[in-house]
Image (cartoon, rainbow, N blue to C red):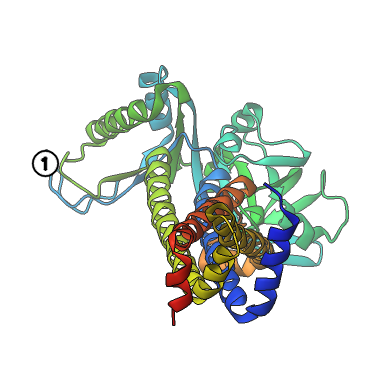
Amino acid sequence: MFSRDTWKEIFETIQKNKLRTFLTGFTVALGIFIFVVLFGMGNGLNNTFTKFFGDDATNTLFVFPGRTTIPYKGYKAKRQIEFENEDLEDIEKNFSMLMEYITPRISRNALVTYKEESDNYNTRAVGPAHQFAEKTIMMKGRYLNETDILKKTKYAVIGRLVEKDLFKGEKSIGEFIDIGGSVFKVIGVFQDDGGDNEERYIYMPFTTRQLIEKNNDKIDQIILAFKPEIGYAGAMAFENKLDNFIRNKKIISPEDPNGIFIRNVADQLKQNQQFANVLQIIISGIAFAVIISGIIGISNIMLFVVKERTKEIGIRKALGATPKKVINSVLFESIFITTISGFIGMIIGISVLNSIGGKTLEDDYFITNPAINTGTAIFATILLIICGAIAGYIPAKRAARIKPIVALRDE
């Protein structure tokens, strides 16, 4: 297989034809480079979808009240639907077999003050289960519990950035903050993988918020989680049953699109994953098209190489070179150039992917951590090398069949 004379001859040929060698190698390297970068970008897009849903539980349904648009059972249109505490209890009673947890949410904006520091923050009045829905991670202290709900305590769980803004590195647990004119004791500090905005929230018991607002029992929205074992189909069926149940209870027409709204995170996740997969397939198709273009380029160049060396091949055959030796000479040259160039293109492509990942790319182009699996990159490179070998073999075989006398007459 290894012949020192053959390789010496190959290096001499490469040395004599630097431009042709460079163009062949450039075509291969560019093909692999574009493939690696495009494939990595596709993965980055997929990562964005995964991250978008990954910071919250994916088995949740968000139920929002709306304003009716269709008269129904004696009620006029434009009726504002409201949720109350008893709605939580009724849903829990009727769907306990399908549910993991349920929590209300009441959202308000308030001026929050601690000593000389103050700023506006969003507050969420919730139940203990809200921690699971938002995948809230406690850094210090504790989250809200059922006792806080029953006793309507004025306890607050603040985000990491709220603590940073107001307390400036001082101890926050056990301190008191003013939230919209009411004093709350800080019992916990949380962080959230959802980003900075998620860490600027303040949580409090929903019963405390209702007490502050004239002791009402109104809630803005209901968040509930279905049991993961019921699967996607079960979640869709659960959503339909829940929609019918609330429409019957609140006397909303089944045809009214605005009476209530249910956002099924599992359904959204599946749709977005399908969209991301289609995009990845399209990007992969484009990337492979680039590789095929590279292969065609190699084939054309090797055809040109053999044509250029026809007379030389004829002389060698006249001096006794066997067809096998002629094929090996052309084939090994093709494999050598495509291998070196392919891996150079792959390494540059991976380096570019590693260097362009960052906050700007994520915020402006929704591409998070673009990267390619090393195995995929090597597979694509080896595929191109094999195709390059085939591209070199075909003209090499043709050259081996040329009779010396014919080759020597070639112009």
Q: Amino acid at mark 1?
A: Gly
Frontmost residue, 303 versus 109: 303
Left or right: where 238 falls relative to 386: left
In the rendered image of this protein, does residue 151 appear above or below residue 117? above
Picture quarter containing residue 246?
top left
Picture quarter containing residue 86?
top left
* Residue at horizontal 22 percent and vertical 49 percent from the top: 68
In the rendered image, residue 207, in percent from the top left (x then y), is placed at 55, 37
In the rendered image, residue 168, in percent from the top left (x then y), is placed at 84, 61
Picture quarter containing residue 381?
bottom right
* Residue 231 visible in the displayed image: yes
* Residue at horizontal 53 percent and vertical 73 percent from the top: 309
In the rendered image of this protein, does residue 9 appear above or below residue 62? below
In the rendered image, residue 1, in percent from the top left (x then y), is placed at 67, 46
Frontmost residue, 50 versus 308: 308
* Residue at horizontal 30 percent and vertical 49 percent from the top: 66
| Residue for badge 1 | 74
Left or right: where 197 falls relative to 61: right
* Residue at horizontal 56 percent and vertical 73 percent from the top: 312
In the rendered image, residue 340, in percent from the top left (x then y), is placed at 67, 62
* Residue furthest top as drawn: 97
Frontmost residue, 195 versus 108: 195
* Residue 214 visible in the displayed image: no
Circle 1 SS class:
loop
Frontmost residue, 380 versus 194: 380
Quarter occupied by the C terminus? bottom left
Left or right: where 60 falls relative to 369: left
